[in-house]
Image (spheres, coloured by chain):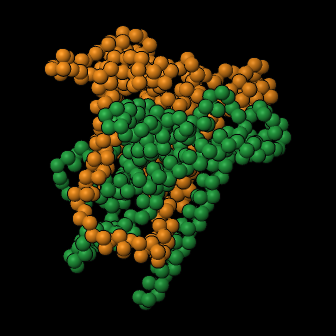
Chain colours: A orange, B green
């Protein structure tokens, strides 16, 4: 799972460590060190720009170019298992061989189509469920007293710090045939034979909603907390019923939070691997799992690359929407 | 407001938090279960902890993961802070939009894609330049640092935009060099963001399965990779014991942070009281 630290989460954390940091920079050895480093006097600007720039170009952008390149290669039994695109003919002519067989393969084979559509469906439904569970929580937190608010937000963030893998693992113990839910239901005599929940789409939805819920709650909370409550008071004074006031005022004002939260859940959920693998079992067809199997089980690096490019094409619009909102938040200086 | 609303929100909150915490609690409770069947209670026992401590495969992997996470976090804080500084303080320059895009895209990139692209990069680099030779700790750290730095950059950037620039400007006007202004004035102020960024990068790396699986080589099996291979075969009480230890560490850290926060708050209150008293 891609674990997204959204800006409010960062703020919360920074706020948490503010006192610790103050104590730390006051320590004499730290002060001494900072002063010493500041005396070195390297000329900053070009260095500060070029180091992270080169790093990101080399380790973030170039890899995508290579994935694109290998998606046009042919699979061979060799190390590494793909052919080169550029070659020399008669040691005179440089030739470029583009092989679109991988793309034809993933377009023609219905397995990939099903995996794509199913990933989109699972991600969309999970996002909606996250919104339905997360919105009342965010709303509830935003409307409690400030002291409670901090405690509750801490409780939302806290699961982040325990392992994601282990939290997904916990659901196996809860959902399996001789797991906690079935044991309780059977000992109460409600059911005679266990309900099969593991290795079903239901388990995958539960896993995704559970793991991604904090990403939905944090941005929603951020927008709901900033809302001007006098608008609601004015609506009530004018005789508007609470539910209508919610639909006409609160909901439209929280749209930026809804969009940010939905993107933060939807985009990584499409490519999710761990949850469908552990909770969904072999019948769950999701594109992240298909890519993983192509790569690790079949050693089909070129096909895996073509699948990766196809996922990217699918996600380019949601990612752009996310970036747009992210940039707007950064400019607003939250 | 009407009656209906007043119970609806608390009920949602209670149900939501139960949903978040019941699975974690179940992990803890069943780690003390004497029975090997993880979900059938067979009496209290701490034997899985003893077995965990005797399992050198898990311990070695845990130590490797901690080392990778620490190097990654330190690297990510340096690079991420640079990105944040460039984007907030250095004004417009050519290629700024590209940098900002490259620094936010890793936040939402599906892990399988990041992992695959990183691996293919390392394989190609080895083919062309002979570096890195094989895959291991170095390649995992590079892959982790590349996505971790994006998180650090976001946090530090938001801290820098909140910071009053006039303090830095005053120091510059008084003749301090930019490097000195940064290390003596800016850095202490953004230190909380750096600490939270470091911790976040540390946990992200410690928790990552997918990217590490793509970029690791033989002999560099990280803790999530060991857990994953065990969990795939079914539930095992040792993993519950491991989870409980991790949860205990997090809980202790939160209590300590809470203590510092409270102390700071009471100090601030005292200072405010003093200031009021001095003005009278």
Q: Nearer the viewer, residue A60 or A58?
A: A58
Query: Going 50% across and 48% down the picture, which residue do you hit?
Result: B68
In the image, is B266 to the left or to the right of A294?
Answer: right
Residue B38 location (% of width, % of height) = 74, 34
Q: Nearer the viewer, residue A244 or A32?
A: A32
Snapshot quadrant of residue B144: top left
**From what the image shows, is residue A334 above or below residue B114?**
below
In the image, is B250 to the left or to the right of A7?
Answer: right
Task: Using the rendered image of the protein, determine whether residue A66 is visible from the camera's viewpoint.
Answer: yes
Residue A116 location (% of width, % of height) = 41, 20
Task: Using the rendered image of the protein, determine whether residue A255 is visible from the camera's viewpoint.
Answer: no
Snapshot quadrant of residue B23: top right
Quadrant of image for the C terminus of chain A: bottom left
Residue B97 location (% of width, % of height) = 22, 45
Query: Going 46% across and 60% down the picture, which residue do you hit?
Result: B195
Query: Going 27% across and 57% down the picture, which residue do you hit?
Result: A48
């Amino acid at each position: 799972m891609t674990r997204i630290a959204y800006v409010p989460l960062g703020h919360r954390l920074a706020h948490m460590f503010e006192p610790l940091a103050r104590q730390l920079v006051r320590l004499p050895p730290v002060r001494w060190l900072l002063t010493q480093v500041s005396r070195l006097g390297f000329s900053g600007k070009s260095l500060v720009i070029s180091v992270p720039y080169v790093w990101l170009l080399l380790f973030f952008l170039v890899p995508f170019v290579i994935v694109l390149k290998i998606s046009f290669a042919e699979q061979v039994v060799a190390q590494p298992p793909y052919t080169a695109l550029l070659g020399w003919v008669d040691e005179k002519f440089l030739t470029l061989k583009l092989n679109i067989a991988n793309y034809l393969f993933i377009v023609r084979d219905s397995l990939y189509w099903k995996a794509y559509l199913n990933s989109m469906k699972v991600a969309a439904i999970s996002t909606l469920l996250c919104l339905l569970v997360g919105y009342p929580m965010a709303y509830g937190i935003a409307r409690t007293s400030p002291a409670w608010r901090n405690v509750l937000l801490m409780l939302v963030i806290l699961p982040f710090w325990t392992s994601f893998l282990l939290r997904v693992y916990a659901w196996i113990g809860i959902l399996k045939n001789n797991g906690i839910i079935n044991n309780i239901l059977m000992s109460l005599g409600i059911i005679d034979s266990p309900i099969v929940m593991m290795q079903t789409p239901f388990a995958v939805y539960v896993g995704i909603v559970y793991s991604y819920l904090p990403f939905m709650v944090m941005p929603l909370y951020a927008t709901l907390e900033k809302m001007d409550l006098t608008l609601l008071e004015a609506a009530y004074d004018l005789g508007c019923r609470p539910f209508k006031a919610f639909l006409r005022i609160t909901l439209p004002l929280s749209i930026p939070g809804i969009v940010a939260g939905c993107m933060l859940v939807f985009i990584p959920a499409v490519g999710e691997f761990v949850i469908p693998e552990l909770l969904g079992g072999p019948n769950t067809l999701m594109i992240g799992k298909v890519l993983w199997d192509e790569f690790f089980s079949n050693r089909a690096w070129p096909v895996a690359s073509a699948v990766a490019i196809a996922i990217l094409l699918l996600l380019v619009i949601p990612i752009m929407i996310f970036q747009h909102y992210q940039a707007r938040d950064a400019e607003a200086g939250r | 407001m009407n009656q209906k609303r007043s119970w609806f929100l608390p009920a949602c909150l209670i149900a939501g938090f139960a949903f978040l915490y019941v699975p974690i609690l179940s992990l803890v409770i069943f780690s003390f279960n004497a029975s090997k069947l993880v979900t059938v209670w067979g009496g209290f026992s701490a034997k899985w902890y003893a077995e965990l401590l005797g399992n050198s495969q898990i311990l070695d992997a845990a130590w490797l993961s901690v080392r990778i996470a620490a190097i990654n976090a330190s690297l990510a804080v340096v690079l991420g802070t640079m990105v944040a500084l460039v984007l907030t303080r250095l004004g417009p320059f050519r290629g700024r939009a590209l940098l900002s895009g490259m620094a936010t895209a890793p936040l939402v990139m599906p892990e399988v894609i990041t992992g695959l692209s990183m691996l293919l990069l390392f394989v190609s680099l080895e083919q062309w330049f002979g570096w890195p030779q094989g895959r291991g700790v170095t390649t995992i750290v590079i892959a982790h640092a590349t996505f971790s730095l994006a998180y650090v950059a976001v946090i530090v950037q938001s801290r820098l935009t909140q910071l009053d620039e006039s303090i830095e400007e005053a120091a510059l006007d008084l003749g301090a060099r930019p490097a000195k202004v940064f290390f003596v004035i800016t850095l202490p102020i953004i230190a909380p963001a750096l600490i939270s960024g470091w911790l976040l990068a540390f946990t992200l790396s410690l928790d990552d399965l997918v990217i590490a699986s793509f970029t690791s080589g033989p002999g560099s099996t990280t803790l999530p990779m060991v857990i994953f291979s065990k969990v795939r075969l079914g539930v095992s009480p040792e993993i519950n014991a491991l989870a409980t230890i991790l949860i205990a560490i997090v809980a202790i850290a939160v209590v300590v942070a809470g203590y510092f926060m409270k102390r700071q708050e009471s100090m601030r209150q005292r200072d405010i009281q003093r200031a009021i008293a001095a003005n009278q």
